[in-house]
Amino acid sequence: MTNAIPELMNDLGRRAKAAAVALARSTAEQRVSALHAAADEILARSDEIIAANAIDMRAAREKQLTGSMLDRLLLDDSRVHAMADGIRQVAALDDPLGRVTSEWERPNGLRIQRVAVPLGVIGIIYESRPNVTADAGALCLKSGNAVILRGGSESFNSSGLIQQCMVAGLEKAGLPADAIQMIPTTDRAAVGYLLSDMQAYVDVIVPRGGKNLIARVQSDARVPVIGHLEGICHVYVDGSADIGKARDVVLNAKMRRTGICGAAETLLIDAACVATHWQAIADALIDAGCEIRGDEQLQARDSRVVAATADDWDTEYLDAIISARVVDGVGAAIEHIAAHGSGHTEAIIAEDEAAAEQFFRELDSAILLHNASTQFADGGEFGMGAEIGIATGKIHARGPVGAEQLTSYKYVVRGDGQIRP
């Protein structure tokens, strides 16, 4: 590593640290004003952003990125407007800072409050999704945190312009421009330095991307990490399921957008309904262009089903592929998910409330759904505005990571001259 990377990164860190102090003292009104100004700037520069994205897309096609990766990278007019709308949704959220999350009084008269405060400086590393630049910047700003962004090299041009729009919003609201910074190089050494040598400046790292990125961050980071490994999401069709609901939910869970972490990757179907429900579900998936990799029972029922291997049960395809197998009831489905799931999102399709309650009680994934698509695993759909990602760990944040999840707390204790004997 040349001296240029440490100098560059330490400078970013110093500036972010100073900006974090200013943000922690800012008013909710200032932060909301900055968010609306940023959204306005994104819309005003939408043609520039789309043009920059076209450069990124050409380079990505030359690199022969997969269809799902290209879909994540693409920006068009509707997606740019959606980014601006997402920022405004974050602006409209209740202020996450200063919330009294708990309070009590001791017998000696001390009054104690637990109050929400910013985390400080957040480092966010993500892959080829330029919209994350807007989501992450907005959520960190709303929660009073400074952020250092490191987008994927494929989205370098798009993300850079979006970050400029976020900075313009900060400046218009009288907040420090250094509150939302982007690492201005695609050199991978910068990521290594951010993970291992910036403890003096960075309070937490949030990775958003594929398995290899998340694993590297969790392995190398010397500060706390909020992240998830994979989205190996399951849909279990119980014997009590309504056939129409089962068909529609499975199809949506897999095929609405195949490249997102909430897309279903494995379908489990109860032996009690495979004769009645399977064909309708299989036809819907195959007609939509999905490859089914199934066990022997499902192959025997439909020659279009490809043989599943042992690896398929542990694969996040992020593509129009789904693994499928027959299980003996909700208990067997739970056992399969416990053995092969990533703790992200699971759904049960059932009219039997007892089966749904068992599914909820015995599984420990971050998000569990009953008669609804796994594609609802999204902070916006939860009413949380934008999100940085879905956290599958159990420390600090779990599930959609929005503005509220990007806060810590301090204790405020009020007395009247008490001393400890």
Image (tube, rainbow, N blue to C red):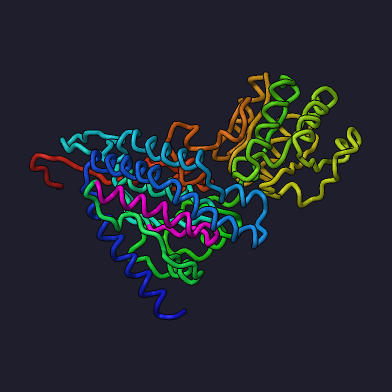
The extreme bottom residue here reads 2
Q: Nearer the viewer, residue 330 or 258?
A: 258
The reply to whether residue 143 is visible in this rendering is yes
Q: Nearer the viewer, residue 170 or 410?
A: 170
Residue at figure coordinates x 71%, y 32% from the top left: 331
Please say if 350 is above or below 232: above
The reply to whether residue 115 is visible in this rendering is no
In the rendered image, residue 149 lying in the magenta stretch gets the answer: yes
Residue 390: x and y in percent read 52, 44
Please say if 262 is above or below 221: above
Quadrant in the rendering for residue 344: top right
Residue 327 lies left or right of residue 12; in this view the side is right
In the rendered image, residue 240 lying in the magenta stretch gets the answer: no
Residue 128 lies left or right of residue 87; in this view the side is right
Residue at figure coordinates x 79%, y 40% from the top left: 292
Q: Nearer the viewer, residue 266 or 154?
A: 154
Quadrant in the rendering for residue 264: top right
Quadrant in the rendering for residue 294: top right
Residue 262: x and y in percent read 60, 40
Please say if 177 is above or below 35: below
Please say if 208 is above or below 290: below
| Residue numbers of the magenta segment | 148-172
Q: How many marks?
A: 0
The chief SS type of the magenta part is helix
Residue at figure coordinates x 76%, y 38% from the top left: 289
The extreme left residue here reads 417
Q: Nearer the viewer, residue 140 or 226?
A: 140
Residue 265: x and y in percent read 69, 42
